[in-house]
Amino acid sequence: MNISTEEKIAHLEDFKTKDWLILDEWEDRDLKWPGDDVVEQMRLEILDFTNFLIFHLKKEGIDLQAETQKYYADWDAEYFKNEEIEFIVEIELIAMKIVGINVDEIII
C-alpha cells in the first residue's frame, strides 16, 4: 500500500503529539529516569527529527534515505548517554518507517 505524501505528513504530525518518554516507558526498558531536563532535550530531539522528515517530504525529488543518513552523520548526540540515544533512535525509527525509509540501511 502506497500512502501519499500528505498522508505521511499527517501521520508524522500525529506522531509528534504522542508522549513517547513517559515514566512507564523508561521502566519498561529497565532504564533509570534521567530527570526532566534530559527528557525535555530528548523530546526536542525527536521533535526536531520529525520536523526534518516533514520538511524534506515537502520537497520534490529529494532522496529522503540519503538526507536521513546525512542527518545522523551530522547529529551531535554528546549531550545524551548511550541508553538515551538508543531510546531516541528507537522512537525515531517509528517515524522513519512512517515515511518509508529503509531503516536497515541507516547507520547511526
Image: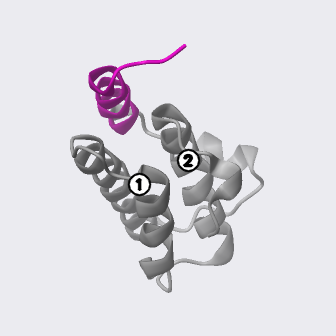
- Image point (59%, 68%), residue name: 85
Provide the major secondary structure of the magenta segment: helix
Q: Residue furthest top?
A: 1
Q: Label 2: few (<14), some or many (≥20) within 10 Å?
A: some
Q: CA gap, disc 1 to disc 2?
A: 8 Å
Q: Disc 1 marks which residue? A: 46
Residue 84: name its quadrant.
Answer: bottom right
Q: Are marks 1 and 2 in contact (CB under 8 Å)?
A: yes
Assign a secondary structure to mark 2. helix
Looking at the picture, which amino acid does disc 2 mark?
A: Ile
Looking at the picture, which amino acid does disc 1 mark?
A: Ile
Residue 100 percent across, percent down from the top left: 52, 36
Q: Earlier in the sequence, mark 1 or mark 2?
A: 1
Q: Disc 2 marks which residue? A: 91
User: What segment carries the magenta color?
Assistant: 1-16
Q: Label 1: few (<14), some or many (≥20) within 10 Å?
A: many
Residue 88 percent across, percent down from the top left: 54, 58
Left or right, residue 84 beside residue 64:
right
Query: Within the magenta stretch, is there residue 77?
Result: no
